[in-house]
Image (tube, helix red, strand yellow):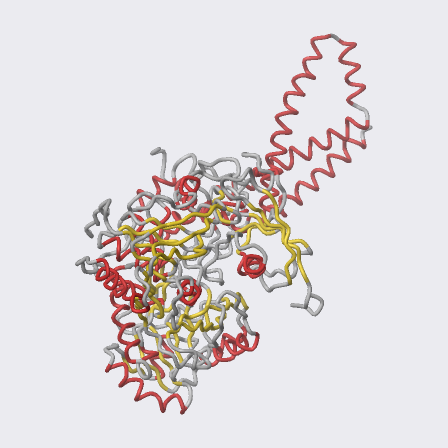
Amino acid sequence: MSAADAGGRRTYRVYRYKRGEPGWRFDMFDVPITRTVLEGLRWIQLHLDRTLAIRHSCMHASCGTCGVQVNGREALACVTPADDLGATITVEPLANIPVLTDLVVDMREFVARFPDEIPSLRAAEQLPEATPLEGIDAYDRFEDCIECGLCLSACPVSATSNAYVGPAALAAAQRLLEEPRGADTDRVLEWADAPFAGWRCHAAFECTAACPSDVRPAERIMALRGRLGGRGATS
Amino acid sequence: MNGSVPGADHRAERGPVLRKGVGIPGSGWFDPRGRALGGFAFSANRVTGLGLVFYLYLHLGVLSMLLFGEPTWNHFIRLATSWVFLSLDVLLILGILYHGLNGIRVALVGSGLVADRQRALWWSLGTVGTIALIGAALHIFGSK
Amino acid sequence: MTPSAPRPARDAPHVLIIGGGGTGGALAHDLTLRGLLVTLVERGEFTSGTTGRHHGLLHSGARYAVGDHDSAVECIEENAILRRICPGSFEENDGLFVALTDEDMAYYDDFVRGCKECGIPIQELTTDEALRAEPRLNPATKGAVRVPDGTMDAMRMPLRFFATAKHHGAHLYNFMEVVGLLVHAGAVTGAAVRDHVTGTEGEISADVVVNATGPWSEKIARMAGVDVPIVPSPGVMLAVRGRLCNMVLNRMHGSGDGDIIVPQRALSVVGTSSWTVEDPDDLDVPEDHVRRMWEEGAKLIPAVSHAEFRAAWSAARPLIGSRAGDSGRELSRTFKTIDHADDGMEGFVTITGGKATTLRGMAELCGNVICVKLGIDRPSRTRTFVTLPHTAFYTDRDRRPA
């Protein structure tokens, strides 16, 4: 935080929507400068408006719950610095997923697009020079994807079609093919080889640009297509 | 069970879906806010695609003027060699070059052949296209 | 294949759980398996209080082996149970307790003995073995002990309990805030709530109301005019980019600041510090505490000092005890169920204290107290019931793990 910002203030322009009220609106809040956008939103919740609904959990880009659009750009609010966004910070819920209330989206529609099996653990590829202790064959770690939905929100194809499974689901499928761990790879390929699955992507690469967790969904979708292409004319 | 949990019915409904600020379903790719390079390339591909389809119909319409005899056609040709028209021709060539070269980029990337070099492809094919466009513009205006 | 639970009978007793952290979720799961009707209300997103913010340690209890025997035993027992009932939710890479100085080494024998007394399986290692297992560990390590620590996703592991409870008929409401308790003739009969989804208010009645709000326990308890000896005790955590270790790394000494590093995907989380506050809502992130995380973290893994910053935040532990202790570290980390009938208020129970790792055990204990109150003779089934995957929370499909 620079000296110029110390004691500075920001205007938060926040999307509001409550079921049963006529429609959505933008509320303006005058907020002291905070380190992150999430801290600013929680300050609003604590001091100005208890009814503001926001999702958050881990505070460090591990849980993926605080995804929003900040000044038109997908971001995790908990790790988005508030000091270089200009005097007015516009915060809206993610696009392409139904809004539950205020900045909260209904993640059911996001999770429903995934194939039946979602990879959760993978081989830990970092620190390959390590020798795990007796009883541990190889180190495990969680998959990069934190199911935040930023990719689906950024995807312009998802903006035109609800039926497209979206980047996260396809990246997850590709991960299952890269590292099956007992998954049924034929079934995953079958799932991906569909008009609104692997073939609907138009290479906009917005998903990779938006991903906060280095999943690189666009590159994975292209790699997935490489595998699908090699499948032959079975479908 | 009490059954009086407030808002239980409203919660079960499907809420509004935002499309990147415009709020009209299907319009998400119009909004340039928050876009990275790949997103602009995608939107420009759609715009040029629509433009080229429009041009195709226009061209067919123009060619149909041949049916109306020599004087009508000659009048059109005089129009077609004006500065304004030639400038539009250059714009058309920009559209063709962009759509074609970006199409090659998408084909290479989308088939999994060159999956992780999309930005490099954009800039290199863009350079090729720019040179071609300048050459075409010089040729078109040079012959005037 | 785990057997399913039958839906609760229409006239089953109704329990309202206030608080959607790990404790509330685990309790909802425990009670639905015993056939009770369960409603849970959480004012924000589930696990948005303290539960989601911790570094994700699946505790072996070793940290408490010397100073807090009860906590240590609770931890190691629950550690083993969680691995069975939440398969696939843990990085099972174990952990290391590392002695860096002579002072640390003076603690070594007590530590080893304490672990053995508490039933925590350990393995003493040479410095070489430790450095081979964790190449980025400080080469000046003097001694290391392997412990059965693990890493969890702090939000997704508890979410499995919510998912399972939901599939068995529990009604779980996030963004529903309790604004008051309904009290009638010396008994709590329900809660007044505000639904932040619709902006409307209403009342929910119940046979028993449970206060599972962690560091906010006292705030809720006061709505019924009773007291809960809870001291909110925040600590700071620091996340840096880079997966600098695969095992959990702990400094071998009594509890102190910055003495643990937990890998979280491609980040490393250094924790933590401790102070006490009155209000768990307005937490600072003191700069000097964050600096101390950088310094202490770098003692365990030197590479921390040039790692890129990702996030710094605070989370409030719910510590049981009076407000006598200054830093909060002196208070016990064990958990407790309080039946407020002892305070003259029927129909109201508080479950509090504890740690992320003991969520299931807390729920079993609280469930037992509630069943006794309601005159139900059904034991907990959560020790062996394999929970649904966390994604089941968001879908209607009952996708059970094989």
Image-based side of B143 in relation to C278, left or right? right
In this picture, residue C158 sits left or right of residue C175: left
Front in this rendered view, residue C8 or A166 = C8
Q: Residue B33 at what x, y percent from top left?
A: 63, 45
Q: Name which residue lies at 37% across and 69% down.
A: C57
Q: Using residue C6 as the reference point, say whether residue C165 is left or right of it.
A: right
The vertical placement of C90 against C303, above or below, is: above
Expressed as whole percent of the image width and height from the top left, the position of residue B93 reads 69, 32
Q: Is residue A160 above or below residue C184?
A: above
Q: Is residue B113 visible?
A: no
- Given residues B116 and C396, the one toward you in this image is C396
Instruction: State left or right for residue B91 relative to residue C384.
Output: right
The answer to whether any part of residue A200 appears in the image is yes
Q: Residue at x 45, y 75 (%)?
A: C272
x then y, percent, for residue C41: 39, 53
- At 35% from the left and 85% from the top, the residue drawn is C143
